[in-house]
Image: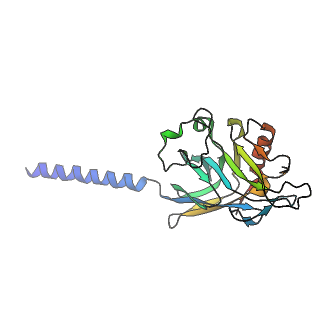
């Protein structure tokens, strides 16, 4: 009997030692988030002010929402850490976007998609929980499950006078979304470090004035993508230059 008890104790000790070892061997993690500022030049974008584009033409913003997805962290040794199943629906009214816990350590940088990959783009929004950015939104930011999501909705009113001396009273609308119009935003040379003592917040700027670069509001005031693909491509190409690190 005594010998059996000793064996049981020995097995228990090995079990708890193994559990502790497994727990200790798990990589330490800490929270990572984006602090995203949507701007018009040097001014915070909002739904109340009147702004001017690069030519001095006035416009306001009635709605601005855009998808960020496929976020990939690049570790210091060059290996990649993708944040799977993480999509953000950004807007001027929100600045904090949690990305969850990631391994501590040094990173060379990161990249993400402006828009959605083809598979996600053609998912059915009904398959997502209401709290998920990929679920149905109000107002809608989806063309129907077989057509895909609107990667960026940017709408409002602008001054349509020839001399650009009037007030914003005419509608502009940019609904950009199509598999080929997703764009990679590359900050692979923007190093950062995740430590265990505190989470990290990466500051990112997105400038709508740069989104409108070389866009003439008076003559290029609207696209639902397929009805004006050249304008949609122009705006999508401007996304990459509109981002910067704060």
Please tell me which residue lies in front, 167 or 243.
167
Q: Residue furthest left?
A: 1
Where residue 200 appears, as percent x and y from the top left, is 57, 63
Where residue 114 appears, as percent x and y from the top left, is 67, 47
- The image shows residue 199, relative to residue 161, as above or below, that is below
Tally the marks: 0
Please tell me which residue lies in front, 115 or 9.
115
Please tell me which residue lies in front, 178 or 224.
224
- The image shows residue 117, relative to residue 189, as above or below, that is above
Where residue 164 appears, as percent x and y from the top left, is 88, 59
Please tell me which residue lies in front, 141 or 122.
141
Where residue 199 appears, as percent x and y from the top left, is 53, 64
Q: Is residue 7 left or right of residue 229?
A: left
Picture quarter containing residue 49?
A: bottom right
Residue at (67% x, 36% y) in the render = 179
Q: Is residue 90 left or right of residue 16?
A: right
């Amino acid at each position: 009997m005594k010998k059996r008890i000793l064996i049981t104790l020995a097995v228990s000790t090995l079990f708890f030692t193994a559990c502790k070892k497994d727990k200790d061997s798990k990589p330490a993690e800490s929270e990572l988030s984006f602090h995203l500022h949507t701007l018009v030049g040097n001014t915070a974008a909002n739904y109340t002010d009147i702004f001017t584009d690069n030519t001095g033409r006035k416009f306001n913003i009635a709605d601005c929402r855009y998808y960020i997805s496929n976020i990939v962290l690049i570790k210091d040794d060059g290996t990649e850490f993708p944040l799977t199943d993480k999509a953000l629906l950004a807007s001027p009214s929100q600045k904090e976007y949690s990305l969850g816990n990631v391994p501590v350590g040094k990173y060379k940088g990161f990249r993400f998609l402006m828009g959605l990959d083809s598979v996600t783009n053609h998912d059915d929004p009904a398959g997502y929980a209401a709290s998920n950015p990929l679920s149905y939104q109000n107002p809608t930011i989806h063309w129907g499950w077989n057509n895909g999501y609107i990667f960026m909705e940017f709408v409002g009113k602008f001054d349509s006078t020839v001399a650009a001396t009037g007030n914003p009273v005419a509608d502009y609308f940019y609904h950009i979304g199509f598999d080929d119009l997703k764009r990679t935003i590359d900050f692979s040379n923007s190093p950062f470090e995740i430590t265990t003592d505190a989470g990290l917040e990466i500051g990112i700027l997105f400038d709508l004035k740069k989104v409108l670069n070389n866009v003439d509001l008076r003559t290029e005031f609207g696209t639902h993508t397929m009805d004006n693909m050249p304008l949609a491509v122009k705006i999508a190409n401007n996304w990459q230059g509109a981002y910067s690190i704060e």
